[in-house]
Amino acid sequence: MTDAAAPGPQTVSRSLWATAWLRLRRNRAAMVSLWVLGFYILAGIFGPMISPHNHATVYREFVKVPASLTAYPRPDAILPQAERVLSRARLTLDEIALDGETLRIEASSSREIDPRVTRYLDRSNLFSNARITETSPDGTRVVMEADVARVHFLFGTDANGRDLLARTLISVRISLMIGALATAVALVIGVAYGATAGYLGGRIDTLMMRFVDILYALPFIFFVILLVVFFGRNVILMFIAVGAVEWLDMARIVRGQTISLRRREFVQAADALGVGSGGILRRHIIPNTLGPVIVYVTLLIPKVILLESFLSFLGLGVQEPLTSLGVLISEGAKDMRGAPYMLFYPSLALTILLFALNFLGDGLRDALDPKDR
């Protein structure tokens, strides 16, 4: 009696998403863009928290200082600043020297010096912890010391003396938040509207899509004016409404996919088994349209970010003290000749972000394209 033949090795078939992930991993540009996008998200979330400066803090002594790895103020600027501050105290400065991070001043006067003279140094952003270390018996000569506040501005400062690195980090957060929020609103409305119109068909589909055509015909700036009138300067509500306008393309894409899917055998089988229209849309139609939808989402986010930059450039978007990449680019364009770094860093940040999103969208399109499998 012979033994039964041993079963051969079983092969496990990959799912659609597993195959798409493997194809995406082979696209180097898409994977690099995915890492860059992850870095932007982390920078937007945690960057403002760990930044040494607040995005709204104004340093009056450091207006439009260029980007530098060395600390400000420079040693050759500290002594003139100390002389300028103490000139209001009507003292004769006999000796002034800088020892590392400590400023030492010997001063005299024709009358007794008030110990509160150190307040002149404390009022300046450059000096702190001013104190009198020595006093002559008649009180007309004193020795004062103060700590020098050294600060770093890796990206320089803007026209108001605010750290450009901190403002770039907070602008990345605002731009990503606006892009994600408006895209999510467009995704929900567009997918639901397009799937319903494509599945029901007939006159309902015709009426629903004619309404979309009417909205296409209206100028976008008209919506912007209405949004500003109704929502004011509340940027969150405003860009939720912007997302409610940007769903038109999403609805057309999902409608076209739904029309091709509703004739498939699995949809007809679900209908024959008595599954309602809502169940078919939730379980069969919408999940099978996620491939093109995900690709379009990666292209819609940079579109919304550019839209926000355009509105902020016109003064209709993000308002102070918050900022966005569009606001920083607008401010940098005004001082492009005198302070080109104010335009360079925000423009570079926006350019890299848009390239990453577009390369990722192209990679997802290739990975999810059924014709290439």
Image (cartoon, rainbow, N blue to C red):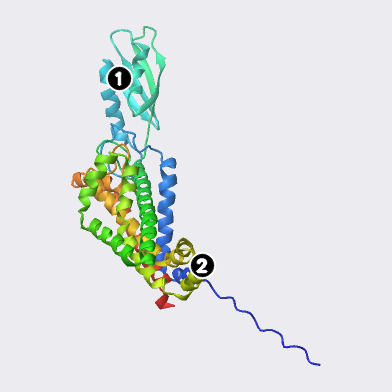
Asked which secondary structure carries label 1, the reply is strand
Left or right of 217 in this view: 260: right
Place of residue 353 in the rendered image (x, y in percent of width and height, measured from the top left): 34, 56
1 or 2: tag closer to the N-terminus = 1
Residue 22 can be seen in this image: no
- Spot occupied by residue 147 in the image (x, y as percentages of width and height): 40, 27
Q: Nearer the viewer, residue 365 or 96?
A: 365
Between 49 and 102, the residue placed more toward the observer is: 49
Pointer 2 local density, CA inside 10 Å: few below 14, some 14–19, many at least 20: few
Q: In this view, does 2 lie to the left or right of 291?
A: right
Q: Residue 94 carries which label?
A: 1
Residue 127 point in image, percent of width and height: 36, 27
Q: Is residue 194 above or below residue 71?
A: below
Give the spatial CA distance, label 1 vs label 2.
Answer: 98 Å
What is the quadrant of the C terminus in the image?
bottom left
Give the residue at x 65% y 81%. 9
**Label number found at residue 250:** none
Q: Residue at x 31, y 48 (%)?
A: 241
Mark 1 vs mark 2, foreground winner is: 2
Residue 152 screen position, x and y as percent = 36, 40
Quarter of the figure with the N terminus? bottom right
Task: Name the kind of residue labelled 1 in the image.
Answer: Asp
Look at label 2 and name its amino acid: Gly
Find disc 2 in the rendering and name its residue. Answer: 274
Instruction: Tell me the element at label 2.
Output: loop
Q: Nearer the viewer, residue 206 or 186?
A: 206
Q: In percent of the image, x 22 and y 45: which residue is there? A: 225
